[in-house]
Amino acid sequence: MLRYTTWTFLIVMKKSNKNKNNAGGRVNEYGNATRGETESWKKQKLVQIHQAFNSDPVDIETLRKAAVSDGGLLTNELRRKVWPKLLNINVYDLPHRPGRDVRENHKDYNQILLDVRRSMKRFPKGMPASQRAVLQEQLTDMMLEVLRRNPQLHYYQGYHDVAVSLLLLVGERTAIAMLHTLSNHHLRDFMDPTMDRTKHILNYLMPILEQVDKELHDFLIRSEVGTIFALSWLITWYGHVLSEFRHTLRLYDFFLASHPLMPIYLAATIVLHREKEVRQSECDMAMVHLLLSRIPQDLPYELLIGQAQALFDRYPPPLLAKRAALQSRTSLSISTFQSFQRSTLHQRPDSVLRRITRERGCSASRRGPGEWAVASTEAPALGRGNRMVKMAVWGLSATLGAAVFAVAQTAMQWGPDVLLQLF
């Protein structure tokens, strides 16, 4: 069995990162790029993303590589376009906004309401209270809507951290569709009535560390710290523990394009990155847990993402499951991942979907109650347009207006949830 010291691991990772093309980016001997070189590879990467997004069918593999490689998807505008494609979501076939009845007699309503009220600091500083209140109402309803449509799923504290990250970036209706897909795939193991599958996912952490740094692994075992310190990282996709929203978005690029276990591989790289701090601490459960649970806010995210991907390639889940006597078939997220990825490979570009939607007009209203109803931003406009034509013929005039507010992507700080603080 091959074993690497942390130092050897970092050297291997550094060489791996220097050998990567990263969409044309070039670095000097210190790993830094000049401003001109940075702008050049960014422009090249933007072109590649746009070409992949507009190809027919959409080049999902290129979009995945772009989301994982340096800089991720680069801009929030691109994220709004690419994230739905990574989850095989047609933005011209989105769910309607939930009705008020979604809150009636739902077993999780009170807990969700408490968690949403505690999520105040997840919103941008300076946002008017009235706007934040609207978003919190949307956040409550979107989670309840997904849970209502999927009675096999169970709410967990931390779910709202994933939901609010989606809501702030893509808006309510796209966020509902994304949360629906994620809840049935990437997050599925966390949504059981018990935490057995969540513990199973956490159990991958120590075997990863053992493969890379046996001494650090043995130190953690002696301390009896376990893996609970990484629970909030895993179940919120780090949204609960990062103070800057831009870092959360960058990690979501990575996770949306990757295997469901990638957040655990990233957790391993974070622990390895802090190896010196850990080894210098007292070998005591409380002390080590306190140290590791307080994630630094100045982590080198691009470096850690590259290392996590390299670890995943070198020690894939089946290898770890075999060595650690972990049965991957007990994870619903893992067992459905291959078929889910295949399902994303035959999507039409948005330009084609937009044309098809226009051609169909309002015929999609024939959908049954069990399906997502077509409620795109353009379908209602078509109906209004037809009415306005008639009104013009009748010599009438009408003015249509829509009010939209944009959520600024500014630095944010969160307050801990009661449950997550325990971890």
Image (spheres, rainbow, N blue to C red):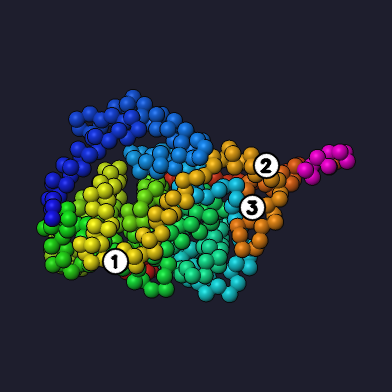
Distance between mark 3 and mark 1 Cα atoms: 40 Å
Q: Secondary structure at mark 2?
A: helix
Please name the amino acid that badge 2 sits on: Arg
Q: Neighbour class for label 1 at 10 Å: few (<14), some, many (≥20)?
A: few
Place of residue 116 in the rendered image (x, y in percent of width and height, measured from the top left)? 48, 63
Q: Is residue 126 visible?
A: no
* Viewer-nearest residue: 168 or 24: 24
Q: Residue at the location (56% across, 40% down)?
A: 350
Q: Earlier in the sequence, mark 1 or mark 2?
A: 1
User: Is 422 covered by the magenta stretch?
Assistant: no
Place of residue 198 in the rendered image (x, y in percent of width and height, measured from the top left)? 34, 67
Name the front one of labels 3 and 1.
1
Q: Is residue 160 above or below residue 249?
A: below
Q: Secondary structure at mark 1?
A: loop
The dot on residue 358 is 2
Q: Residue at the location (35% across, 53% down)?
A: 259
Please name the amino acid that badge 1 sits on: Gln
User: Mainly helix, strand or loop, the magenta region?
Assistant: helix
Circle 3 residue = 374
Q: Which quarter shows the C terminus?
A: bottom left
Q: Secondary structure at mark 3?
A: loop
Circle 1 residue = 327
User: Is 394 covered by the magenta stretch?
Assistant: yes
Q: Is residue 370 above or below residue 356?
A: below
Residue 157 is left or right of residue 94, and the answer is: left
